[in-house]
Image (spheres, rainbow, N blue to C red):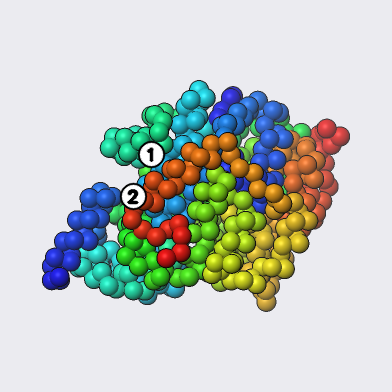
Amino acid sequence: MSHNENTQGLLSELRQQTGQNAARCYQCGKCSAGCPMAQEMSLRPHDIMRAIASGHEQRLFEGDSIWLCLTCETCTARCPNECDPARVIDFLREKALAKNPKKAPRPIRAFHKAFIRQIRTHGRVYEMGLIADYKLSGGALFQDVSAAPGMMARGKLALMPSTIDGIADVRRIVDACLAKSHGDHGEEA
Amino acid sequence: MKIGYFPGCSLHSTGREFNESLRLFAPAIGLELEEIKDWNCCGATSAHATNHLLSIALPARSLALAEEQGMSEVLAPCAACYSRLRTASVELRENPSLQKEVSEVLERPIAATAEVRSISEVLSRMTADIRGAVVQPLAGLKLACYYGCLLVRPPKIASFEDSEMPTSLEGIVSACGAEAVHWDRKLDCCGGGMSLSRTGSVIRLGRSIVSDAQKAGAHAIVVACPMCHSNLDFRQRAMLKGQEGEVVPVLYITQIVGLALGLEPEKLGLRRHFVKTAPFIQRITTVPATAQEA
């Protein structure tokens, strides 16, 4: 694929799916100046906008920058030209999972998967189950283990999950949405 | 005032004192909470970071239930739930083809008529009621009101107040008789949902927030989000490791109101915190009150 086709591909796909036009970004850098994670990113928010506009797909999907965004929305709130970098990054993450989920940093991917599995199982997030699932599927196994008794003593971790009446509804919703995105979000590939 | 209520998952576990304290004082200011029957998780960060349709469809189910149950307004105290519910509602209203697609996925109609409100919005509209119900004014207490991200951003969603200079929490603590300090970090992000998956970043971000509150002379940080609370409270010891200064208790805005209304600290969940709240409570009870026994 030529460089130009690539540019058109990602730009127009973004526009079609989100209404966002990354070419509007004039690289003032205000988004990156206010970004709390910019110092940990190799591609900062304005670099990400530029990479889309210039068709550098590989740079976007190779590194972990898009996965470090906290969606604090500072970039979107402050953009002087009505771009929405936070929404653009969400679009890129969904696309990255569909292309190759293994590129996403393991703990972050494990957390998102465990979270959505909790919703699919109970309709709500049961935090004990979330933490156990996250740790067993790639999260930091021993981190915060010593905090569990303190959490218990403060009554902050429920011992038993409760499942909503409409769980069949929620399961159907989760499955339908995952199937439509063609991505790998539910089960380990 | 009667309002639909979406507590969200955290308010049943790590953020249970947010729910407990709100429910405890609500009757005293005439706020009636009607919980949406059979609500489900809003999907939070994990849905919007991985699947946009899911991030709209999950909150849409709860909003559809609220509509069926005759609610015109829904209060979502958790800032993340508020943001996801309100985003879904705004996008569904703006985009008829998305509304059709989501309605098909849900297998029920969704008009997104219910207005989603944050706790700061609802309480700041009731400051007169709060002021009238205060029996233990929090005079002499200096509080750092912390908004973080989703309570005020993005401006299109959290449209209730100025995203760069919000004042709702300051108004509520003033109604309680406390002083809101001026500080710089009230809009910074605490690291939100990456508490487990990228703890180092969360500690770096939280440290600058807590240090700034210390510098401003705050006796406590006031929050309106269970993730902010959990990051700043539970991880504060790690944040302040090797740093100067005293720990700063982190209280929910609903606990502050409850204390001013003379409710028992223990019932407001102040013993559930990791940073000890006893010295803070001591400050309140040593202030002369008009109705100490209430």
Which disc is residue B41 wearing? none
In this rendering, the answer to whether B168 lies above or below A74 is above
- Is B70 rendered above or below residue B137? above
Q: Secondary structure at mark 1?
A: helix
- What residue is shown with label 1? B105
Q: Amino acid at mark 2?
A: Lys
Query: Is residue A97 shown left or right of residue A26?
Result: right
Residue at 42% across, 52% down = B48
Q: Examine the image and state in which quarter residue A50 appears.
A: bottom left
Q: In this rendering, does residue A165 appear at all?
A: yes
CA–CA distance in space, label 1 to label 2: 10 Å
The kind of residue tagged 1 is Val
Residue at horizontal 69 percent and vertical 28 percent from the top: B27
* Residue B164 in view (yes/no): no
Image spot of residue A60 (x, y percent):
31, 69
Crowd rating for badge 2 (residues with CA inside 10 Å; few <14, some 14–19, many 20+)? few
Q: Are marks 1 and 2 on the same chain?
A: no
Pointer 1 with pointer 2, Cβ within 8 A: no
In which quadrant of the rendered image does the N terminus of chain B lie?
top right
In the picture, the quarter occupied by the C terminus of chain B is top right
Give x and y (percent) for residue B72: 48, 26
Residue that sits furthest to the bottom in the current view: B242
Q: Which residue is mark 2?
A: A180
The secondary structure type at the circle numbered 2 is: helix
Q: Is residue B137 left or right of residue A13?
A: right
Chain designation of label 1: B
Instruction: Measuring from the top left, give residue B197's x and y in whole percent.
Output: 54, 66
- Asked which quadrant contains residue B218, the reply is bottom right
Q: Chain of mark 2?
A: A
